[in-house]
């Protein structure tokens, strides 16, 4: 079956009542057949019918051996980092999500896990940073906020040879566009808060593993640490997943239109969107993503940090907020918002300028969005 059909039906099979929408299980504990004789579910941190259903759906859509649903994207990332031990080393992209940067530099380092950040768009940089203690390579499918695209197959060859886990935060590129496990990744992480949920009303995360063994190791950490997704959120997430392909297709189309329009605007210095032929990784993005490039666009305005602030405050439809992937369009300034947790040197290394503005294109009519941006850009 095709993606859209599977998104609607896998994990949503009717139960004995015939309900076309599975019931939401809120029970925290389950009555057992006998002492030491465990039923399918025992305690809801360890598993629940609602979570099993949405995890089944995600695993199917990611071509994974198994998936796990978490209470947030960061909980999922933290669980994946739980595979690392004191003394281990991780190589990560230098333009990763601000929260991941913070987790690596302020939490993982407490356990003496060493981090090296590299420009991950060149796989040779990753190969050069790998040491005997390196246990994981972590990249984003599209770097944030500069929209760089790594060469997944080249990285997979490097990590396989070095016996290092290859993990991908694919939040910006949902599985209707690209499935990193097929390109050689071992683990895929999603902030399901974004495209999966799609309506800005459900904080969630997901990990998907290539092998049953890796899925079991991650499940052990998830159950031991406990940041699981609750029953209500499992339902919201599952509902969002059913329309993900449609939403992402339309949002990607609008984002391309807007990026093309921005590129022609006299007060815009450069537009970063992998769907534009001017983007340095356009051909690679086409190779991996086909005709859809997601709905995140960054651009440098012709002005200083205050002019960029005025643009962000000058829209009426785009909400001034971090996050992305939902029906409503958002605008933000990476230097003071999504990437404020970077130290200034790291921001400079990642090319995050003060005049950079990032938009997350939603599902509104693209003509209205362009008019809104046109008005905001007149504030420079
Ligand atoms: C939002 C986001 C996260 C963190 O997810 P939460 O659900 O907010 O915890 C991680 N990576 C990327 C790329 C994100 O956009």
Image (cartoon, rainbow, N blue to C red):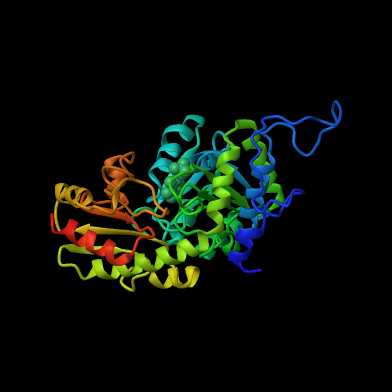
Q: Residue furthest top?
A: 35
Q: Residue 121: where, in percent of width, then height?
A: 41, 60
Which of 84/322 is in front? 322
Q: Quadrant of residue 153?
A: bottom right
Residue 135 appearing in the image? no
**Which residue is located at x 33 percent, y 41 percent?**
342
Position of 180 relative to 324 (above/below): below
Query: Position of 235 compared to 139: left or right?
Result: right
**Which residue is located at x 62 percent, y 45 percent?**
68
Query: Position of 234 compared to 267: left or right?
Result: right
Query: Position of 171 compared to 376: left or right?
Result: right
Number of numbered discs on residues: 0
Quadrant including the N terminus: bottom right
Residue 194 appearing in the image? yes
Q: Residue 253: where, in percent of width, then height?
A: 39, 69
**Which residue is located at x 84 percent, y 28 percent?**
36
Q: Residue 255: where, in percent of width, then height?
A: 35, 64
Which of 255/279 is in front? 255
Q: Residue 380: where, in percent of width, then height?
A: 13, 55
Which of 147/313 is in front? 313
């Amino acid at each position: 079956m095709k993606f859209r059909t599977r998104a609607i039906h896998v994990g949503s099979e009717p139960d004995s009542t015939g309900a076309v929408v599975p019931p939401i299980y809120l029970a925290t504990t389950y009555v057992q057949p006998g002492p030491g004789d465990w039923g399918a579910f025992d305690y809801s941190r360890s598993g629940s019918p609602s979570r099993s259903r949405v995890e089944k759906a995600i695993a199917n859509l990611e071509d994974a051996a198994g998936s796990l649903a978490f209470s947030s994207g960061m909980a999922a990332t933290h669980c994946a980092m739980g595979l690392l031990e004191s003394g281990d080393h991780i190589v990560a992209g230098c333009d990763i999500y601000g929260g991941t940067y913070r987790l690596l530099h302020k939490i993982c380092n407490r356990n003496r896990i060493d981090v090296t950040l590299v420009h991950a768009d060149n796989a040779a940089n990753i190969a050069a940073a790998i040491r005997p203690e390196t246990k994981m390579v972590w990249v984003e499918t599209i770097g944030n906020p500069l929209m760089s695209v790594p060469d997944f197959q080249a990285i997979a060859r490097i990590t396989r040879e070095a016996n290092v886990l290859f993990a991908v935060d694919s939040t910006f590129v949902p599985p209707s566009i690209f499935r990193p496990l097929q390109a050689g990744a071992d683990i895929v992480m999603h902030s399901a808060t974004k495209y999966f949920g799609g309506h800005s009303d459900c904080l969630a995360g997901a990990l998907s593993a290539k092998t049953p063994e890796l899925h079991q190791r991650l499940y052990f950490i998830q159950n031991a640490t406990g940041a699981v997704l609750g029953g209500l959120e499992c339902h919201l997430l599952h509902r969002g997943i059913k329309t993900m392909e449609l939403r992402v297709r339309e949002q990607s189309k609008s984002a391309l239109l807007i990026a093309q329009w921005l590129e022609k605007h006299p007060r815009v210095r450069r537009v970063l969107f992998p769907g534009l032929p001017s983007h340095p990784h356009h051909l690679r993005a086409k190779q991996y993503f086909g005709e859809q490039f997601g709905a995140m666009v960054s651009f440098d305005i012709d002005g200083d940090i205050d002019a960029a602030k005025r643009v962000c405050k000058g829209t009426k439809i785009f909400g001034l907020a971090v996050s992305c992937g939902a029906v409503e369009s958002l605008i933000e300034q990476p230097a003071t918002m999504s990437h404020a947790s970077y130290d200034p040197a790291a921001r400079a290394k990642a090319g995050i300028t003060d005049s950079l503005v990032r938009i997350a294109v939603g599902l509104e009519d693209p003509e209205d969005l362009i008019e809104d941006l046109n008005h905001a850009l007149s504030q420079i």
